[in-house]
Amino acid sequence: MRINVYSQELTSEVLSISKVSNTGIEYKAVQFVLHSSPMLHHPPQDDDRSAVTFWLPQSERGLREFASAMRTAAELVEAEYWKNRDNDSDNPGKGGGT
């Protein structure tokens, strides 16, 4: 499975989700809320906004591996940020620089 989320859909909103199944097991997730039109949704009791939800592993090993993957993703994003920032400061006409 491949899921594409385009830059125009990204927001800084990240939620902690918790649900108890019919077996009594509590499952937890991290949810990245995506940009969408407010006309499509009803406030907060009916929050059906678009989102990408990562259901967390229950095992310590699984949590460690997922946390490591998320740190790697954050490092890649940070590297791109600094690369773009450095490029912008070299080219003030591009919208960056001082």
Image (cartoon, helix red, strand yellow):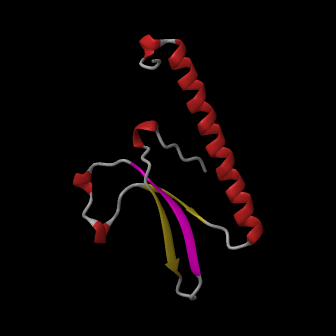
Image location of residue 98, percent across then percent down: 45, 18
Residue at 40%, 38% in the rendered image: 8
Residue 85 against residue 21 in the figure, above or below: above
Residue at 52%, 87% in the rendered image: 22
Residue 55 against residue 87 in the figure, above or below: below
Residue at 36%, 58% in the rendered image: 49
Residue 79 against residue 60 in the figure, above or below: above
Q: Quadrant of residue 87?
A: top right
Q: What is the magenta range?
A: 26-34
Residue at 69%, 51% in the rendered image: 69
71 or 61, nearer to the observer: 71
93 or 10, nearer to the observer: 93
Image location of residue 81, percent across then percent down: 56, 32
Query: Magenta region's main secondary structure?
Result: strand
Q: Is residue 32 magenta?
A: yes
95 or 1, nearer to the observer: 95
Left or right: 49, with 84 as reference point: left
Residue 63 against residue 40 in the figure, above or below: below
60 or 91, nearer to the observer: 91
